Amino acid sequence: MARRRPRLRVLVSAGPTRERVDPVRFLSNDSSGRMGFALAEAAARAGHDVVLVAGPVALATPKGVRRIDVESAREMLGALRAEWRAADALFMAAAVADWRPARVLAGKWRAKDGGARRARIDLVRNPDVLATLTRGRRDPRRTVVAFALETGDGERRARAKLRKKGADWIVLNGPGALNADTTRLVVLGASGVRIAIPERSKRAAARDLVALLRHGDVLAAS
Ligand code: CTP
């Protein structure tokens, strides 16, 4: 009889976060959530138990995936923190906003008739969700995959993020991946290994990334 592979408890974050300015406005970014949703789908198809923590996106929940919707970075941290305790792996694909308005206006921000030509929004730093979860350290019992969107030569910066955030792998993509169907990736491992994944659909790339959970040790040693 074929031996069943152990199911892993896989946590995935996806999409942008929204940081409220007032009841009808927010700061956010162009993330569509597609890479994270593709990862959740690929992980579920590979037989894992998947929890998907999603920022505001217009995507259907993949089959067999438990989804938790959040809006802001702080809500995302709260949801991930609760789920991370029981998880074996994390794909941190969400595009978390680094800043949020220092205050959220209770009523609508009005232009008024004073003739002002400038206004400003004071921003404060959001928590680094991933570094908070890992406390900046790798845990040999679990696999953490971070993502980095870099312009220009981002590999050096991505390596620094890999260390700072306590991740085992960091997946590097260019700004062309935002809101696109396909992506070209470079995956950097904490061991120093570098894997290039040529341009392919996000669904196909997601299958390759999910394979890191089972074959990552072999790849890192090769
Ligand atoms: N990330 C996070 N919390 C944040 C910002 C980013 O958890 N407040 C995570 C992202 O989900 C991603 C990784 O950290 O997995 C790298 O994100 P990126 O935006 O590239 O890095 P930053 O830490 O925001 O650094 P910078 O803005 O300087 O590029």
Image: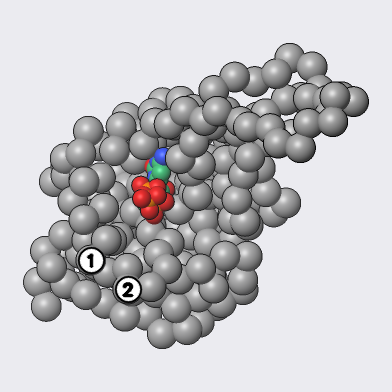
Q: Camera-side residue: 6 or 133?
A: 133
The N terminus - image quarter: bottom left
Type of amino acid under label 2: Asp
Residue at the image point whose x is 63% and y is 32% from the top: 120
Residue at the image point whose x is 38% and y is 57% from the top: 147
Q: Is residue 126 above or below residue 190?
A: above
Q: Residue 130 appears at what percent x and percent y? A: 34, 40
Tell me whether circle 1 and circle 2 mark residues in contact (CB < 8 Å).
yes
Residue identified by numbered label 1: 156
Residue identified by numbered label 2: 153
Quadrant of the rendered structure where residue 111 is? Answer: top right
Residue at the image point whose x is 13% and y is 68% from the top: 192
Q: Secondary structure at mark 1?
A: helix
Any part of residue 162 in sight: yes
Answer with left or right where residue 89 lies relative to residue 101: left
The C terminus - image quarter: bottom left
As drawn, which residue projects farthest toward the top?
106
Residue at the image point whose x is 72% and y is 51% from the top: 58
